Amino acid sequence: MTATLPETGAWLLCGGCRRMLYGKRFARAGRVCPECGWHAPLTAPQRVESLLDPGSARLLEIAAADNDPLSFTDTRPYTERLADNRERTGLPEAVVCARGRIEGNPVVVAAMDFRFLGGSLGSTVGEAVTRAAEIALAERTPLLLVTASGGARMQEGVISLMQMAKTSQALGQLDEAGILTVSLITDPTFGGVAASFATSTDVIVAEPGARLGFAGPRVIEQTIKQTLPPGFQTAEFLLDHGVVDTICPRAELRTRLGKLLSVASRRPDDVPHQLTTDSALITDPAALPERDPWDCVRAARRLTRPSTLDWLALLVEDFTELHGDRAAADCPALIAGLGRFEGVPVAVIGTQKGHSADELADRNYGMPSPSGYRKAARIMRLAAKLGLPVITLIDTAGAYPGIEAERRGQSVAIAENLKLMAGLPVPVVAVVTGEGGSGGALALAFADRVLMCANAVYSVISAEGCAAILWKDPAAAPRAAAALRVDARSQLAQGVIDGVVPEPEDDSDHLAFAGAMRAALASTLADLLPLDQMNLVTTRRARFRRFGTGSAVLLDAEKENAR
């Protein structure tokens, strides 16, 4: 049910909880029910007014053409329907476009209006959205699309269908130019709009309860003869299934979008920062004490150590977490998003364990599924598009070894990440903060600089796994840890890592720990940021190319002598 905003203090019925609401109070709350949080529809002009900074909106003209390619008539001629909708809504079409600012950040907005023929995608709407994208491209300004639609406009036949291709192409050009695109999904967004520009943006934000899907629920139930699960196609359902990045209440939209636009625009913040080259980062193995590797394994697994969420809170400002692989799921064991480190816009990706039994279980013990690695890959591609350095924080026993993970291609997901990271045209810094387990860790550690915390470990397999396979006894894990040389000193001596972040004696002292981490990351980024794309990629590939070359060179020499 929808509620019409009264012009007076009249009462109206909430479309969610069915309680009576006082009109003026409802309007002051942004048309959100104070009792149940139901978000009532907004008109396109209301959207523009609520999202853009006061006084910043500059409307873009939309030519209201009477496109009627089929001379379509159902119970009434299509041209009459257009005229009636224009008179009733006061709009030329089902979309309003404007230039403006959100929290001071320039943006081009195209906001749809469901009142106008159900927000359907006709040729004029497609043209308006495309023109908005072209203006964003010409001005190198982020594009925000606010969607509300029942789908393609049937009265215009296949010409309406072509608008899906036309608008998608326009967004593709923004991808090629490195310009951020964001969609705000409002209720409802279906059909051709959902299957084109609404879901092809870099970031998908949804209002609570907003429905998004290709086919409407009645069509689906009639086709498959099944009852749909509760909440099907709602923002909450889609967040769990990896389709949307975040759900944001209406009252927080401008602030949340402002942070995202600010970071993605690569603009420095208002606070002066200087990435220091001074660091306590240890690069000489001799400067590290020899330690029992098994002691390091136990230290790396302590639940008091900072998790990725702790590091984000301590080191990163304006962080916006992005969810989902856009295909099947959102992996809770992997955190990813955009923020600022020392004033520099960055993408941060990290595995998340937790500090309690419940959190460990909720986060799958920090072992990512294929959707986690694909989410990481999506954020890395976004970082490459926007020119943002990538920081990865690794604390995992390895990739999740489950039936469903194998069914969804765990090996493929890891392999794709390795190939992607090899060619990322932006600086990449990886830090093993706790456990660095096998290929599940390496899938986030193909970096320009690989660092380890002093008590962290990095290994081809867990000590217990190695002991069970080679010693036939899991109790031989301490011997296996020593044989594998999993400790930071050994990894530095082998050249696998580039530096060691010192730790406080008490790793639960997160503030002291964060000071050392901040200095290490700042000095490392200060070295990498001046490098161009070619140098970054060439050097990164050479770094990993050299591992194991000693034996290969010897073999080549032996072959030559044999001739």
Image (cartoon, rainbow, N blue to C red):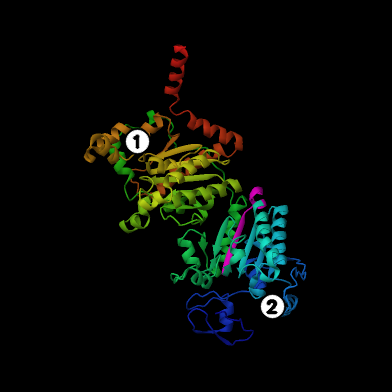
Q: Nearer the viewer, residue 286 or 460?
A: 460
Q: Are marks 1 and 2 in contact (CB under 8 Å)?
A: no
- Name the quadrant containing residue 150: bottom right
At which x and y percent is residue 284? 42, 29
Residue 292 in view: no
Q: Secondary structure at mark 1?
A: loop
At which x and y percent is residue 288? 36, 32
Which residues are drawn in magenta?
173-187
Residue 560 in view: yes
Q: Amino acid at mark 1?
A: Asp
Label 2 sits on residue: 74
At which x and y percent is residue 480? 27, 35
At which x and y percent is residue 474? 23, 40
Residues at marks 1 and 2, CA–CA distance in whole angstroms:
75 Å
Q: Nearer the viewer, residue 334 or 94?
A: 94
Residue 383 lies in the magenta-colored region: no
Count up the numbered dots: 2
Please give the label number shown on residue 487. Answer: 1
